[in-house]
């Protein structure tokens, strides 16, 4: 075929391309996109088959930094909101109670290092003592009755599909606060502690394991008293001798063990 004939044959093709160049480019991009999806799907499939998909494409997000004192404050506010809904007064924050709660949370946090589906919690500590014992051990005697709530939560909200060790999403501080209070309010015993009218003081302690993965939240409640407790002033009432709570005795105006 000579040059003139070749030119005549190419003219219709060139004209067709010019008239339909938009559609041709669009279809070409669609084919390229589909080809990319096919290649990506093949890589993922191969990774799952070989067990190395996490090494290929899974990148955990940055773990958020949770301020334990801010978390304690937010939980305290949520607890008081629940009490106010019932008509009860807000609980006064006690630094003494918070310190006792933090120590127990730290003890439990050290037992829950690493990613766990079930967080271990217990009201009994390593010495076989409970919250009322711990209160007295740290010099808190000024209460008539007391109670304790504990909540454990992993900061990992979800994992990548096919990988139980690669976090895909973490809880925020606000979410942890909400989940802890919701968990307590959905448990009859914990709910009763929160809504006991006689309680007037509380302290909350938050602790986490060394990897900042699991968080333990302990809340201690008391019905505080102003007299009659160990090392406190003796109670006085008209026409009565000064007195203390049993088994304490009033000695020189102070309640002490006999």
Image (cartoon, rainbow, N blue to C red):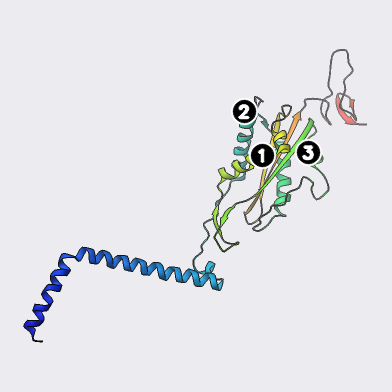
Q: Earlier in the sequence, mark 2 or mark 1?
A: 2
Q: Which residue is mark 2?
A: 85
In front of the other: 200 or 254: 200
Q: Which residue is mark 3?
A: 135
Label 3 element class? helix
Q: Which residue is mark 1?
A: 186
Q: Residues within 10 Å of mark 3 (few under 14, many from 20)?
A: many
- How far across and how far down the image is residue 241, in percent? 89, 18
Q: Residue furthest left?
A: 4
Label 2, label 3: how far apart the Cα atoms are: 29 Å
Q: Quadrant of residue 1?
A: bottom left
In front of the other: 41 or 195: 41
Q: Residue furthest top?
A: 239
> Mark 2 touching mark 1, by CB under 8 A?
no
The mark lying in front, picked from 2 and 3, is: 2
Q: Earlier in the sequence, mark 2 or mark 3?
A: 2
Q: Residue furthest right?
A: 258
Label 2 element class? helix
- As displayed, is residue 71 above or below residue 14? above
Could you tell me which quadrant the C terminus lies in? Answer: top right
- How far across and how far down the image is residue 255, in percent? 86, 28
- How far across and how far down the image is residue 169, in percent? 54, 54
Label 2, label 1: how far apart the Cα atoms are: 15 Å
Label 1, label 3: how far apart the Cα atoms are: 26 Å
- How far across and how far down the image is residue 141, in percent? 80, 33
User: Image point 67% across, 30% down: which residue?
Assistant: 91
């Amino acid at each position: 075929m000579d040059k003139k004939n070749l030119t005549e044959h190419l003219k219709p093709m060139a004209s067709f391309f010019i008239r339909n160049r938009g559609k041709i480019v669009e279809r070409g991009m669609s084919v390229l996109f589909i080809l990319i999806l096919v290649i990506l799907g093949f890589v993922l499939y191969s990774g799952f088959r070989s067990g190395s998909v996490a090494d290929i494409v899974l990148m955990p997000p940055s773990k958020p930094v949770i301020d334990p004192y801010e978390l304690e404050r937010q939980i305290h506010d949520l607890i008081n909101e629940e009490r106010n809904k019932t008509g009860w007064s807000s609980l006064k924050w006690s630094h003494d109670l918070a310190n006792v709660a933090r120590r127990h949370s730290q003890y439990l946090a050290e037992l829950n290092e690493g990613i766990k589906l079930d967080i271990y919690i217990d009201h009994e500590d390593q010495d076989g003592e409970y919250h009322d014992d711990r209160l007295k051990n740290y010099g808190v005697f000024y209460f008539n009755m007391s109670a304790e709530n504990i909540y454990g939560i992993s900061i990992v909200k979800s994992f990548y599909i096919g990988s139980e060790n690669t976090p895909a999403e973490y809880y925020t501080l606000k979410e942890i606060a909400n989940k802890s209070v919701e968990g307590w309010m959905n448990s009859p015993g914990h709910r009763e502690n929160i809504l006991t009218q006689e309680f007037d003081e509380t302290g909350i302690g938050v602790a986490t394991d060394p990897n900042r993965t699991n968080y333990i939240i302990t809340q201690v409640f008391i019905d505080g008293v102003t007299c009659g407790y160990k090392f406190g002033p003796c109670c006085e009432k008209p026409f009565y001798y000064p007195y203390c709570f049993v088994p304490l005795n009033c000695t020189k105006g102070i309640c002490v063990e006999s």
